[in-house]
Image (spheres, grey):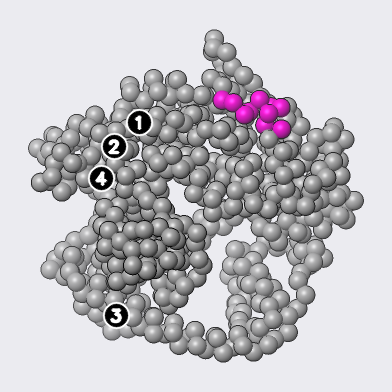
Amino acid sequence: MIGSSSSLAFRSLLKSSASRAGLTRPVARLSGLTPAAMAFHAAAVAQERPVVIVVPTDADVETTAADARFFLAALLGLTERDAAETVLACPSLEVDPYRALTPHLAVASARARALSGLATGTARIVVASARALLPRLSDPARLAAISLVIAPGMEIAPHDLGERLAEAGFAPQDPVDEHAAYCVRGGVVDFYPAGEASPVRLEFVGDVVESVRRYDSATQRSQTALDHVAITPQRELLHDPDAPDDPDRRDRSASVADYVRRAGAEVLVFEIDDVADRVRALERQWRDSAEVLLARGRPAPPFEVMATGWSDLSPWLDAAHQVTQLAIDDDRATMHVPATPALEYRGRIGDWAEEIRRIRQRGESVLFVAAASGRADRTIEILKDYDIRARPVGEADDLARAGVLVATGQLSRGFHLPAAGLAVFAESDLFEEDRRTPERRRSATTAFLSDFRDLKIGDLVVHVENGIGRFVGLKRLAIVPGQSPQDFMELRYAGEDKLFVPLERLDLVQKYSGGAAPALDRLGGTTWEKAKTRVKKAMRDMAEELLKLYAARKAVAGHAFSPESHWHQEFGDAFAYDLTVDQQNAINDIARDMEAPTPMDRLLCGDVGYG
């Protein structure tokens, strides 16, 4: 992320570009912006007030949030961590509330974090999908009351903090090595927020927080000190205070619009027609699910209790600021700001250099956004061979002399904004291999799923949460009459217990590869949890031995080779074949090891690959 390292001149350039294009203030209807340019517009508006962006799909949520995070960090000079805390994603639950399915913890916590950011006023930008708008929510004031920011020097009793964590949805566990878990041990409080890569440890002196640190859950060793940490609810629905005797009843007294009003946020809706179609489709699906339950004689809360329908969302969205790529063809006034997506050069650096010269001759600025600092440095070296002066944004105080400004960050796609005199290029526009990354990831997923081709009826499998079971076969079940049946993997456990796993959740299951045939676990039993506990202890013991071994190796000096230059990059680019993800990772890892001053500890294995 470039925020904290960018120069004041660069921030001024972005602010003046947004101002010249008229993007610093929201308008009723705006057309012409690409998705990335719309994120730039939202970041410019968010300098003054919070912004909620509504996009059609959950996939749009991820890319738009990343783009907005980059631009807001650049405009305000935020660090990567600050940008991650102020630009939040609010995806859909991905489950039907009438099918008794629990949303994935990572999804539920991301939604709760975004809603908490609106309720507490800490979020600058929240990006929500169309389907994320429907569920009814708990009172924003209650969500804000649970949220808490802990910093060294703060006074709070460890026991009281433990109660706050429990109220926020954390479960007691010792040691804390799973998401949404916490533990209070004397003057130490550990907790593991969902969505974070490592847990947090708070150390107290009496009732005063002395330190806040991240730590490795496997080794219990401290990693990095933090100046603060936010405690937010792990799920968006809280217990209904009007039903103290019913622990399963949830408070659904509010809607997304209530959170937006509390935050005083501007609402930008991107492609309102697509958003409307998806909201109406999900409403029909949920209403059909409720009717099916009632037809079966089972209780089903009314749709209006569980969700907000299109009839209520439509006036709210219609009053919002609407943004589209194409001009809106209606009688209402529409402001048009043309923006065109950057060309895809697919490694043709010479063509890109010629385009840069044409842009600079028109007196416009050029910004290149690399995903990593290494690619940024290499791009600067490559452009030097084409007599183009490229400078990092942290050093480019004299913007007029820099042909290209180079920043690091995540940007999905570049764009040209003529009204602002600004051309932005993303790494994915320039290097073809980055556009193939999603396809390679899908191929890796396909390879993972292909392991099940050898699975035969009667084989043992392991479910992440329920342990060892026996594969019975695939079964097609019609969950909702009138809709297409879904395929499930049927697993048999001890006591003739059955578990049906949707094929889209095969990531939870793998084929058993142990030696002797083990006993089947019982659904809801304790044998699997005890087995996992034993394995965790064994892993911690092994990790301790490895740490001692590698500490000794680190103390031995080795030969550090010089870093790769752009000549290495050009040599690699001349390779006639496309590298796989694993091949590229192996090359990067070996190069990094060779440049380190410690002995290399790596063995590269491969096969010829005939057939």
Numbered badge on residue 139? 2
Q: Residue placed at 72% from the left, 48% from the top?
A: 7
In space, the residues marked 1 and 4 are separated at their CA atoms by 16 Å
Q: Position of residue 107 (x, y in %)?
A: 38, 49
Sequence-wise, the earlier of marks 3 and 4 is 4
Read off the residue under disc 3. Answer: 534
Sequence-wise, the earlier of marks 1 and 3 is 1
In space, the residues marked 1 and 2 are separated at their CA atoms by 8 Å
Foreground label between 1 and 3: 1
Check if mark 1's residue and mark 2's residue have beta carbons within 8 Å.
yes
Answer left or right for 608 relative to 178. Answer: right
Read off the residue under disc 4. Answer: 238
Sequence-wise, the earlier of marks 1 and 2 is 2
Answer left or right for 279 relative to 524. Answer: right
Q: Secondary structure at mark 1?
A: helix
In space, the residues marked 3 and 4 are separated at their CA atoms by 34 Å
Q: Position of residue 246 (x, y in %)?
A: 12, 46
Check if mark 1's residue and mark 4's residue have beta carbons within 8 Å.
no
Check if mark 4's residue and mark 2's residue have beta carbons within 8 Å.
yes
Residue 384, quarter of the rendered image: bottom right
